[in-house]
Image (cartoon, rainbow, N blue to C red):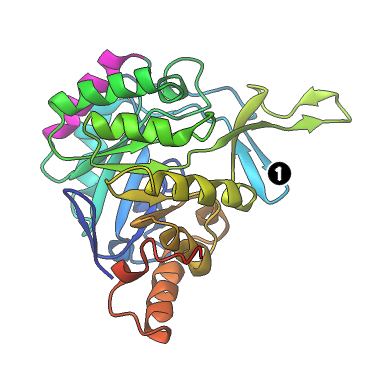
């Protein structure tokens, strides 16, 4: 079940998506979180962020909208408090890093680079829920390349870059961040959407628009992961509507070396373990000796 990203080995290809799993500790009452291949903790910024006003979540058909807005207490708080609590978790912990300016990204990455127990970061240039920064960096090749280049200069471990689906050609963005030193690429982040309360004639979210996730986005996510996996040489981590092992296997067949599970965690806090066991069962039933054999094994003929 082991898979290798560029500088990081996972005990299995199942990870958790940032923003849906807290810091991992919140799920210890339900499962042995050390069984998960990797945990990507919630978005972390240089300074504390209060996030967006409520309401900032809404259920939608086959999915959900969120506009949390990267609420967190800042990287220094993470280092001094959270990191002390998660040091003992026996799996790969990655920090999702976001910022409003390139300088914010650089400084946050520098601070996390000094933490021995954190083997990588996920550079979030794709968040649709903040008014500045975030997705703005991920919607053009030039800005995406710039932030990756500057962070790569100071960050020496696994640099995973998370891409936005809210672009015309995601392959171009992927090639741009690969060229500037991304070790791996994760996608997709949420799609920009909105919900309306017809009775009140008002938007449901305080921010009007937010990020759509869940099963509704899976066909788009699969297509984009397939496109990116065929456009770059670095490992790709797929996500977007993964609810079970079959969904995860489909992402690996189109070229993902690993997957991240997000919205499904809110429905079933044990879903990661079920997906790990389900992939293992699929490999046994189909005569595969290693999970790496199914990466990009889609037969398009």
Label 1 neighbourhood size at 10 Å, few (<14), some (14-19), many (20+)?
some
Rendered residue at 73%/29% (across/down)? 204
Question: In this rendering, is residue 105 above or below 213?
Answer: above
In the image, farthest residue toward the front: 301
Which quarter of the picture shows residue 253? bottom left
User: Is residue 99 visible to the viewer in this orientation of the structure?
Assistant: no
Q: Quadrant of residue 143?
A: top left
Q: Position of residue 297 (x, y in %)?
A: 40, 66
What stretch of residues is rendered in magenta?
Answer: 101-114
Quadrant of the image for the N terminus?
bottom left
Q: Position of residue 39 (x, y in %)?
A: 32, 51
Q: Specify whether residue 28 is in view.
A: yes
Q: Please, which residue is most extreme toward the right here?
A: 199
Which residue shows up at 63% across the image and 21% down it? Answer: 207
Total residue callouts: 1
Q: At 42% from the left edge and 48% from the top edge, which residue is drawn?
A: 21
- Residue that carries the numbered disc 1 in the rendered image: 60
Helix, strand or loop at mark 1: strand
Q: Is residue 92 above or below residue 128?
A: below
Residue located at (65% from left, 47% from top): 63
Q: Main secondary structure of the magenta part?
A: helix
Q: Is residue 161 magenta?
A: no
- The answer to whether residue 37 is above or below residue 110 is below
Camera-side residue of 142 and 47: 142
Q: Position of residue 121 (x, y in %)?
A: 26, 38
- Decide if residue 285 is on the left or right side of residue 222: left
Q: Is residue 2 left or right of residue 48?
A: left
């Amino acid at each position: 079940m082991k898979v290798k990203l560029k500088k990081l080995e996972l005990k299995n290809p199942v990870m958790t998506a940032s923003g849906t799993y807290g810091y991992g500790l919140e799920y210890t009452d339900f499962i042995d979180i050390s069984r998960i291949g990797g945990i990507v903790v919630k978005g972390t910024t240089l300074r504390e962020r209060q996030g967006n006003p409520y309401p900032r979540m809404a259920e939608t058909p086959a999915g959900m909208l969120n506009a949390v807005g990267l609420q967190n207490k800042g990287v220094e708080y993470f280092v001094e408090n959270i990191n002390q609590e998660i040091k003992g978790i026996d799996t790969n912990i990655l920090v999702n890093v976001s910022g409003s300016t390139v300088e914010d990204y650089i400084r946050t990455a520098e601070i996390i680079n000094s933490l021995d127990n954190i083997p990588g970061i996920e550079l979030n240039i794709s968040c649709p829920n903040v008014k500045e920064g975030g997705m703005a960096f991920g919607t053009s090749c030039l800005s995406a390349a710039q932030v990756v280049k500057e962070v790569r200069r100071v960050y020496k471990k696994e640099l995973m870059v998370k891409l936005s689906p809210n672009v015309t050609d995601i392959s171009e963005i992927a090639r741009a961040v690969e060229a500037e030193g991304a070790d791996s690429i994760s996608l997709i982040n949420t799609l920009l959407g909105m919900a309306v309360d017809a009775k009140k004639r008002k938007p449901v979210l305080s921010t009007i628009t937010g990020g759509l996730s869940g099963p509704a986005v899976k066909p788009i996510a699969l297509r984009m992961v397939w496109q990116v996996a065929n456009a770059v040489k670095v490992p790709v981590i797929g996500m977007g509507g993964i609810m079970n092992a079959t969904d995860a296997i489909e992402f690996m067949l189109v070229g993902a070396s690993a997957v991240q599970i997000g919205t499904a965690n809110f429905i079933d806090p044990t879903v990661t373990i079920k997906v790990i066991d389900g992939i293992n069962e699929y490999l046994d039933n189909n005569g595969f000796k290693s999970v790496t054999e199914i990466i990009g094994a889609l037969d398009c003929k």
